Amino acid sequence: MSVLLAAPKKMIELTVDGEVVRVFEGSTILDACRMLGNEQPTLCYGDTLTPVNVCRVCVVEVEGARTLVPSCSRKVEAGMVVLTDSERVRTSRRLVMELLGSSVDLSTAPDALAYIEQYDAKPDRFGPDAATVVQDVKVDNDLYVRDYSKCILCYKCVSACGEDHQNTFAIAVAGRGFDAHISTELDVTLPESACVYCGNCIAVCPTGALMSVPEYEKRQAGTWDAENETVVSTVCPYCGVGCNLELHVQDNEIVNVTSPHDHDVTEGNLCIKGRFGYQYVQNRR
Amino acid sequence: MPDLRLLNAEPSDAERIAIDAVLGAGNGANNRTARDDRTKRHLLLPALRAAQQRVGWVSEGALGYASRRLAVPPAEAYGVASFYALIALEEQPADVTHVCTDLSCMLKGATVPEGAHPSPCLGLCERAPASYRTIAGEQPVEEQIPAVGPPLPQAGQSGLRLLRRIAAGVDPESIDAYIQTGGFESLRHARELGPEAVLREVTESRLLGRGGAAFPTGVKWEAVAKQQALPHYIVCNADESEPGTFKDRVLMEQDPFALIESMAIAALATGSSHGFIYVRAEYPLAHRRLQNAIDLARSRGFLEGFDIELRIGAGAYVCGEETALFQSIEGFRGEPRNKPPFPVEVGLFGKPTAVNNVETLFNVLEVVTDGGEAFSGIGTKDSTGTRLFCLSGAVARPGLYELPFGATLRELLDLAGAERPKAVLLGGAAGAFVGPDLLDIRLTYEDTREAGVTLGSGVVIVYDESADLVGALLRIAEFFRDESCGQCVPCRVGTVRQEEALKRLAAGRAHEDELQTLAELAQVMQDASICGLGQTAANAVASAIVNLKVFAA
Ligand SMILES: Cc1cc2nc3c(=O)[nH]c(=O)nc-3n(C[C@H](O)[C@H](O)[C@H](O)COP(=O)(O)O)c2cc1C
Ligand code: SF4
Ligand code: SF4
Ligand code: SF4
Ligand code: FES
Ligand code: FES
């Protein structure tokens, strides 16, 4: 016999692309799609972050709604009729990818590149003079670099550094419109800012705009070898919290350290020691 | 609260004093964050504005001091400061002139002298070309500089409702003059009726919002009134930045007590104890007169159980979007929120909020005085009451006109003296162009909707044969590119691509399929943008291409 500990959550029934699905109240359209194995493209959505719904690549058509709605954040309602692959949806998604692809360097953004394929987007349609966010790479510390030519302004790093995880608030969005960008106060360098080098922003960045120095240097040197990367799981040796670590190893060298998002202690987050303090493993003196 | 790392520079004495005047005096040197200040983030923009007014820019020291006092992370304070066009983060002269280069002023030959800053519409379009001057200092000066122009054209005309007192020249600074001309009678009556009856009257009046979205005011107020969460807020949207719009300015400058009275009625009906009026920075006369009206109304006991605070913007069109306006008041970047949830449930400070346009609120006085049913008898079935129209451009008598809904565009143009227009922009930059074939359209919500155009905020800009329509389109595209908050991709990048394509078309260097590109940009902006700014950013351009065949081969 089972005992009910809390009132059961209400189930909501809706239709996605003609298929009926029942999900818990409070779920998003994206959750409902996933129940059906109907994956949606997402860029600014993060499984451990509060939705900011700014990239708009996940938009779907909801019957009766004037505009398309972001599936990553719109809550389901009973009787909703959702279309994820209508002409209207495909057009918007294609245009979103064309707008991003024509203004941002997506060369290290695997998901974005896949969506460009999937939606047959042609970023070069706007011509060679289309404005871009190209700028110099910021290399101002030994641990990670910021290449905002690759930034799609998904706000994930800001959420991770701020309210959602780290509570350091070292970075925020500054400026407005096409000039909006991620910045420290008055654009001071990271060492002058509040940054504690937890690297939690790197862990959520979907485009490679934020990158560890080893990865950056290897890519520059042409020796980056993702194909032959192995991942070793271990537990962080530094303190008693017990964060799970995944050591990303290329050619016998640790190139990145992450933590699984579904690990209930870290939700993918680490501190400077877990993220970057692995040099001693490699000192073979 | 995180352990904040703070900017090192110290504010100058002048900056510290100016900021303290907003935040109250700081405390001891070592306790760098006063506990009480921690929930006062909503004072961030007023503090930045104080520094700006005092020394002409926000220095590192001033930014650091404001973030310290309010326990706002410096990176976020920088994000907020850099959002607004009228907050300078680099040193500049104390005396700055902002010259309007927007639609109506363009038609009157506006040019930007050396050293002056170009500005979007300053809300002085009936007396174009206009500028706005700020002089920082101990006694800061903020000054609107319109070209000299005729008095309000409808002065003396009968049948005016919203403009009645203004046409009669009632002293806008005297509460006695206001009372003698019927002022505060509606509020007295509303208090007799009680909240439910007021709600009933407003609903029965079928009053629709005049801010642009044409939402039924009664429905909005009832939704707020029934919310369990407390407190409720009433917010007056006086950000008026739609190019070509100046009606709310005239109302606030010339009849400020009426706005205070109508907000007190709105508060009664929605169960709100606190109200905010958010006025754009470029309306200094309105600031003074409203503050005077609030102070006098309070001292005479008209605001019992209810208080009103004036909040002043800092140069951002998007802050007129209701949720961006909340963000701005709360001390965040003016980035619109995703809806739902709607403001009636989750609004200012996360509480149920009724947000209304100035002109909408003025109508409430008529509704309460005459009764909802009588009000609904004016105008047409679906557009009740009168409407204010902002006439500018190629007209003999530019200015504010009040007409019952149902008058045609031709009638309005005849009143203002427009000879053979080539085109008319209805509803502002977010509106649409119509050609001479549409002059007999009735200016109602239903007729404009059917014709695929909009009344928006009541803008009517007239273009005669000599006018440069392509230039107007380029300006509109530039406006949206400048004013996009930058949050969502369709608008942030779409407005840039729209402007680029228009520039190519204007220069005769169009790419293949350029019009198709513009049409697709219009679709993604309309369909996938977060807020009305992006959703309407292609309207005027699209309407000029379709209705006026601007780029027809
Ligand atoms: C970009 C943008 C700017 C807006 N600016 C204004 C404004 O300046 N004044 C205003 O009353 N409404 C403005 N609105 C409309 C408001 O979001 C809101 O609908 C209105 O204030 C509601 O008041 P109402 O129902 O009385 O019209 C704007 C909307 C958008 C999308
Ligand atoms: S490394 Fe950590 S503290 Fe530094 S910016 Fe990234 S998330 Fe913030
Ligand atoms: S740096 Fe990365 S995580 Fe941050 S906004 Fe840009 S793309 Fe997103
Ligand atoms: S539509 Fe434009 S103004 Fe509105 S949220 Fe998106 S970027 Fe900001
Ligand atoms: S993933 Fe939904 S808006 Fe970005
Ligand atoms: S004041 Fe110049 S266009 Fe409005």
Image: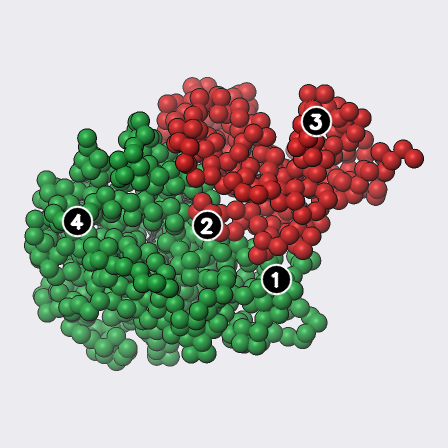
Chain colours: A red, B green
Callout 3: CB less than 8 Å from ligand 3: no
Nearer the observer, disc 2 or disc 1? 2
Q: Mark 4 vs mark 1: which is more N-terminal?
A: 1
Q: Secondary structure at mark 1?
A: loop
Say how many tags the image has.
4
Residue that carries the numbered disc 2 in the rendered image: A176
Q: Nearer the viewer, residue B260 or B149?
A: B149
Q: Secondary structure at mark 4?
A: loop
Nearer the observer, disc 4 or disc 3? 3
Q: Residues within 10 Å of mark 3 (few under 14, many from 20)?
A: few
Residue that carries the numbered disc 4 in the rendered image: B467
Residue that carries the numbered disc 1 in the rendered image: B71
Quadrant assignment, res B499: top left
Residue that carries the numbered disc 3 in the rendered image: A223
User: Is residue B419 at least partly visible in the picture?
Assistant: yes
Quadrant assignment, res A254: top right
Is B479 left or right of A218, judged from the image as shown? left
Tell me what residue is drawn at x 78 percent, y 43 percent.
Answer: A273
Callout 2: CB less than 8 Å from ligand 4: no
